[in-house]
Amino acid sequence: MFQNVSIRFRLTGWYLFSVTLIFTIMALISWWAMRASLYGSIDNELDRRNVNLYNGLAAATVPSVPDMRKELERTATNTWGGGLFQVFTEDGVLVFQSAGLAQHSISTQAPHVKPGERWRQNIGSPAWPARLGAQIVTLGGKNWIFEQGEPLELAQASLHSFARLLILSVPLLIGLGTMASYAISRRALAPVDWIIHDARSINTRSLSERLSVPKSRDELRRLTETLNSMLDRIESSMRQIRQFTADASHELRSPITLIRAAAEYSLNRARTNEELLEAMGRISRESEHTTQLINDLLLLARADAQADVLVRTTTDLCSAVSDVLERTMPLAQNRQLKMRSEIPALPFLIESGPDLVERLVFILVDNALKYTLPGGEVEVKVAEAGGSVVLEVSDTGVGISVEDLPRIFDRFWRADKVRSRKEGGTGLGLSIAEKIVEQSGGTIRVESEVGRGSRFIVTMPYSRKDGQTV
Ligand code: ADP
């Protein structure tokens, strides 16, 4: 119901509701307390008069009902009883009613009072509202019921004017409080309007702008700081995307320029067969490189869009490593590199497709072979450690400098562009490897020293049987 109302109004509404409730309860309590206090003092007065009456009569020593009546008639004019009293025998027979009470036609029925009890009753006649109080007293060896009356006009008038005061002041206080609450919430929420204004002015072209942070150390400051740090992340992602698009177009342009140049060279004028074969060979190599580049880009785009996450197959890491080693062995021999491997006989099932696991191992082994000088050594190890499977690919190659280490997983980053390209590299291998590892829930890291070699360490969760993660 209140979804479309601003927070400011909602806060004020809640405040109005709670303040009205609290003030109404407080007004009722204070009216009730005032009434209790007024009746309390009237009751004390009634008791005091009964005591006075008793003391006055005790001095006269009254033995029987007629004597009591006589004594009361005689003294009724003095102030012992306050002029508003009646006396009954214990059995409820009226002994005497003072003229003050008779004048107001007060009932001559004895009240139902028990010994030791103080009995009270309000009589609500509009002409003479009063309160009666009775108790049993023992006088001359007999029990008598003394009943006193006290007009309530004054007390009721005070109660009425107090109620009037409450009825006037409570809504006034509620109104003032609500206005103050609206002003306070307006002030407190003013920074929200600035945030909205600032946020609206930020778009893809002005992503470097930030929201102004309020001075106060409160939730709104935390909110702006959080939004600003989110903008930092968005800006850096946008920068990466722009860089990636620029790099991708550049990388695609080079082979296409080479293909075009080779084709134009062949078409320019009559060429010998050898020249044509040479040009065809170049076109074929560059097309192959371009296809590889496009496939890599596609794979990364699919991984970014999380399209492969749903493919929940498992692949044995050990057999993937054996296949890759078999495939790359001739390459190693060609480069006069020694290959060593330690692969356990038990399967280590990784949550990933067989193509992807082979691709991961291939990228690491191929890099190790590419960046190691003849006579060097490449070692591939699979082992279990801390509940995960660890794949280690180490080489005694050129190594990676400390400054370059944090960048090697960046797309298109290569320490030596010419060398990488000559070796058929696209500069996307390690970013693809990182994605594959990430999607299987693992981590990849590298230790390296220039001139001494590198070690890529991949740690991934595994299972022994399908669907059973260790
Ligand atoms: P590329 O296609 O260039 O091999 P990668 O993403 O696989 O692209 O690797 C990025 C860069 O990291 C390489 O160009 C190279 O400079 C460096 N690199 C990768 N593996 C190794 C290694 N084993 N030894 C030394 N440098 C490496």
Image: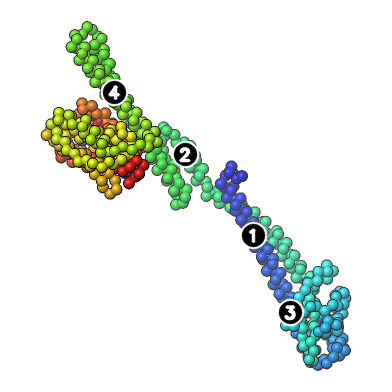
Residue 23: which disc?
1
Earlier residue among tags 2 and 1: 1
- Quadrant of ligand 1 in image: top left
Earlier residue among tags 1 and 3: 1
Q: How far apart are marks 2 and 3 (CA)?
A: 75 Å
Q: Looking at the picture, tell me which residue is in the foreground, 18 or 386.
A: 386
Q: Quadrant of residue 374?
A: top left
Residue 290: which disc?
4
- In this rendering, position of residue 454 left or right of residue 150: left
**Callout 4: 10 Å neighbours few (<14), some, many (20+)?**
many
Q: How far apart are marks 2 and 1 (CA)?
A: 41 Å
Q: Is residue 208 visible?
A: no
- In this rendering, position of residue 216 left or right of residue 16: left
Residue 118: which disc?
3
Q: Which residue is drawn at 40% across and 43% down?
A: 229
- Residue 308's place in the image compared with 140, above or below, is above
Q: What element carries label 4?
A: helix
Q: In which quarter of the image is residue 22?
A: bottom right
Is the distance from the Cβ of mark 1 to the nearest ligand 1 atom less than 8 Å? no
Q: Is mark 3 on a helix, strand or loop?
A: loop
Residue 403 point in image, percent of width and height: 23, 39
**Callout 1: 10 Å neighbours few (<14), some, many (20+)?**
some
Residue 44 point in image, percent of width and height: 72, 78
Please state which of the two labelled residues, at mark 3 or mark 4, is closer to the viewer: 4
**Callout 2: 10 Å neighbours few (<14), some, many (20+)?**
some
Earlier residue among tags 3 and 4: 3
Q: Distance between the residues labelled 2 and 4?
A: 42 Å
Please state which of the two labelled residues, at mark 4 or mark 1, is closer to the viewer: 4
Earlier residue among tags 2 and 4: 2
Residue indicated by mark 2:
199
Residue 278: which disc?
none
